[in-house]
Amino acid sequence: MLLPVEHFTPLLKSISGKRIFYIKQAGNVGDDLIHLGASRLFELAGATMVKSIEGSELAVIAGGGNWGKYAQAATLRARWYPAIREHALPLIVWPQTIFSLDEEPLPPGLKTFFVRERHSLSLMPDAILAPDAALACEPPGDLPDPEARTGIFLRNDCESCFAGIPVGGDFQGDSVAICQRDPMAYIRMAARFETIFTDRLHFAVAGLLAGRDVTLLPNNYPKNRHMWEAWLESIGCRWADKPPAQPAPRPARSAEKTTAKIARYLRQLKKPRIAITMCVHNEERFLEAHLRYHQAIGVERAFVFLDACTDRSLEICRQFPWVDVFERPKPANLKILHNWQNECADEAAALALDCGMQWLLHIDPDEFAFGNNPALQSRGGRAPDPGTKLLHRASLHGMIARTPPEIDQIVMAPRESFPVL
């Protein structure tokens, strides 16, 4: 933790020993850092996150977001209010920055509202001041050594104060655009720089968790400054009103090598995170090859639903640490198979979102996805080996990279396997 545990006492008391329905903010990888910290606090408080309102004693809206600033976020929160009211659940809102209580009124059934800085407390004196949950995170144990001196990470969205302003540093970019939805990868990315300047509040937190020299910059309203005054200044974070204009001088060859190494690493971070889900009934013939193949072309998580299997399907799935297996036999009175498959897919989609996946491929065990990418060209007069050529053509990362950003669904032609007698 970046702060002594005593600072989190109000949050711990609010959930102690409870079964909690936890309502996440959609957000970005910064919000994922908040959820990671929240999970740590739930564990310390002996609280349990449950997936259903029906089995809960308390509803908690995740901290972070800017209360009253974004209509879409308010709408996503409000969609849960009827169910919370129907089950007569007490509701707690974890630490927020309040932008406007006129634009987003307080929810019905509210028991406690936490704010994360003193300006919000002045807007809502009945609230309780508590740290942003991301400050409760623990860093990963395998942090890399720094590979560059200075990284300048600036927003490129509506909250930016520095759009189009030339800046220095060994690297410049928007940390949220670079790093996919993985809070541990966010911290590791920060660890690769000795010094960080950023107007992304939670990338500043990631840098502090990595033990780096961090300077927080303003965004276009006072959230960052208020958070710095409330918590970050006391744990060693610096403040500046603008990013540095010029990098410190260094040998050209050294700077060139550093930039190339960081660029390769950041290209890896930009790869989309892909999961698959499938329903399986006695598919031992194809299952191992299916899982190995899809891992090779970019899949990093699988959600497999077993339908009363009597063969080695379960044993095969357990060979792969990245595969989550669920016993889910079809209902006896099932009339339409797709209804059961879709229920499993919906569950897999929620699980995939929880662990930071960005794409979910719904597939059968006898189908093998194929990205159909352009053929890999020879380099330096050397032709790539057949295996490399196949994986390049099949790569799901390559397929998604060629997909326009406004596309949110890809329908693929099936490539089914069949026995050769």
Image: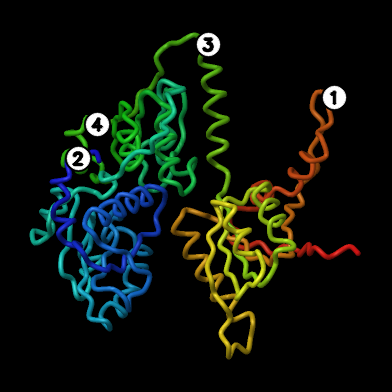
Secondary structure found at label 3: helix
Going from N to C along the chain, the mark reached first, 1 or 2, is: 2
Secondary structure found at label 4: loop
In the orientation shown, which residue stands out farthest toward the left? 125
Q: What residue does disc 4 label?
A: 237
Q: Nearer the viewer, mark 3 or mark 1?
A: 1
Q: What residue does disc 2 label?
A: 3
Going from N to C along the chain, the mark reached first, 2 or 4, is: 2
Going from N to C along the chain, the mark reached first, 4 or 3, is: 4
Q: Is residue 275 left or right of residue 33?
A: right
Secondary structure found at label 2: loop
Marks 3 and 2, how far apart at CA: 40 Å
Q: Residues within 10 Å of mark 1 (few under 14, many from 20)?
A: few
Residue 214 place in picture, x, y as percent? 30, 29
Q: Nearer the viewer, mark 3 or mark 2?
A: 2
Q: Residues within 10 Å of mark 2 (few under 14, many from 20)?
A: some
414 vs 245: above or below = below
Going from N to C along the chain, the mark reached first, 4 or 1, is: 4
Q: Nearer the viewer, residue 347 or 214?
A: 347
| Contact? badges 2 and 4 (CB < 8 Å) | no
| Contact? badges 1 and 2 (CB < 8 Å) | no
Q: What residue does disc 1 label?
A: 381
87 vs 206: above or below = below
